[in-house]
Amino acid sequence: MPAKPHEEAFDAKPVLDLIASIEADLQRLKGLVEQRVEKFDPANPHNKAPDGKLTEEGAECCYRMFDEGKSRYTVAQQMKISFAAATHRFNNWRKLGGTKRQRALLG
């Protein structure tokens, strides 16, 4: 029976280096995209109209806080609105689809 020819050992280092390079590029791209995600400020004066009611931007700010899992109580405190107003916005947010709703642009 003939002897098996000597098999060369597989060098995994180039493959692992390539994977690390791809992962670094993906992290860099993720960072670029995440920077473009608009941050919202609950204390922004543009969130309220002169009559004290929330503007469209203010309502969207509430909805984004609900998207993050904030409670109605927290939203009321941070937006400086009543708990009843936060509850009203929460119910509207649920009717719009909750986290699956179409987000409005801020700014």
Image (tube, rainbow, N blue to C red):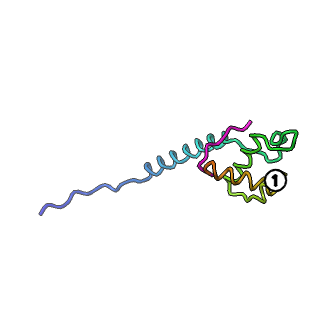
- Dot 1 falls on a residue whose secondary structure is helix
Point out the image quarter for the N terminus: bottom left
The segment highlighted magenta reads 98-107
Quadrant in the picture for residue 48? top right
Q: How many marks?
A: 1
Query: Residue 83 falls in which quadrant of the image?
Result: bottom right
As for residue 45 lying within the magenta part, the answer is: no
Q: x, y (%) of residue 58?
A: 77, 43
Query: Which residue is farthest top?
Result: 107
Disc 1 crowd rating (10 Å Cα; few below 14, some 14-19, many 20+) is: some
Foreground of the two, 67 or 101: 101
- x 27%, y 56%: residue: 7
Percent of width and height locating residue 105: 68, 37
Please name whichever residue, 37 or 80, is drawn nearer the observer in this view of the structure. Answer: 80
Residue holding disc 1: 78
Q: Horizontal and vertical percent for residue 69?
A: 68, 57
Report the residue at 41% width, 54% height from top: 12
| Residue 105 counted in the magenta span | yes
Q: Amino acid at mark 1?
A: Gln
User: Overall secondary structure of the magenta stretch?
Assistant: loop
Residue under the point 70% across and 41% down:
38
